[in-house]
Amino acid sequence: MYSVTTDDESEPQLAALPPSALAPFAELRTMLEITPWNGNPYNKFKPDSPMRTCAFGPNTEGMVTYLILEDQRRVDLLNIVWID
């Protein structure tokens, strides 16, 4: 299992999510704790890169960019976007 962390930039983005985004984000967070490599590569020309993206929400209104630190079993959330 991986730990999922936020930083000084992603924490306010997480706090700004509307109520309608919270359940989809919780589902995404669970996926990141278990299978973070299931996200899409941030750079399609580097498919094995640990920097990934994943859409979330019923109509993919949300997008998270994150970095997998495999040696630490950690996922750092870098950017969280919700378009409503």
Image: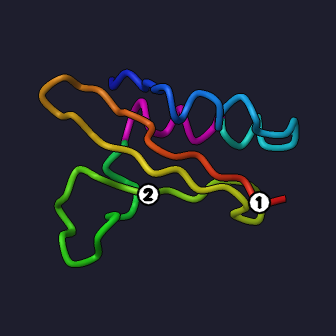
Which region is colored magenta? 26-35
Q: Is residue 77 rendered to the left or right of residue 57?
A: left
Asked whether the residues under the numbered discs 2 and 1 touch, taking CB atoms below 8 Å apart as contact, a structural biologist would say: no
Q: Which residue does the numbered mark 2 point to in the structure image?
A: 53
| Residue 47 location (% of width, % of height) | 21, 68
Q: Is residue 7 magenta?
A: no
Q: Is residue 1 rendered to the left or right of residue 49?
A: right
Indicate which disc residue 83 carries. 1
Q: Residue furthest bottom?
A: 45
Q: Is residue 10 above or below residue 4?
A: below
Secondary structure, magenta segment, majority class: helix
Name the residue type under label 1: Ile
Label 2 sits on a secondary structure element that is strand
| Residue 46 location (% of width, % of height) | 18, 70
Residue plotted at (71% across, 43% down): 24
| Residue 63 location (% of width, % of height) | 59, 56
Q: Is residue 60 above or below residue 7?
A: below
Seen from the viewer's position, the closer of residues 42 and 38 is 42
Q: Is residue 31 magenta?
A: yes
Question: If you read the primary sequence from the N terminus, does the residue marked by circle 2 or circle 1 appear first?
Answer: 2
Name the residue type under label 2: Thr
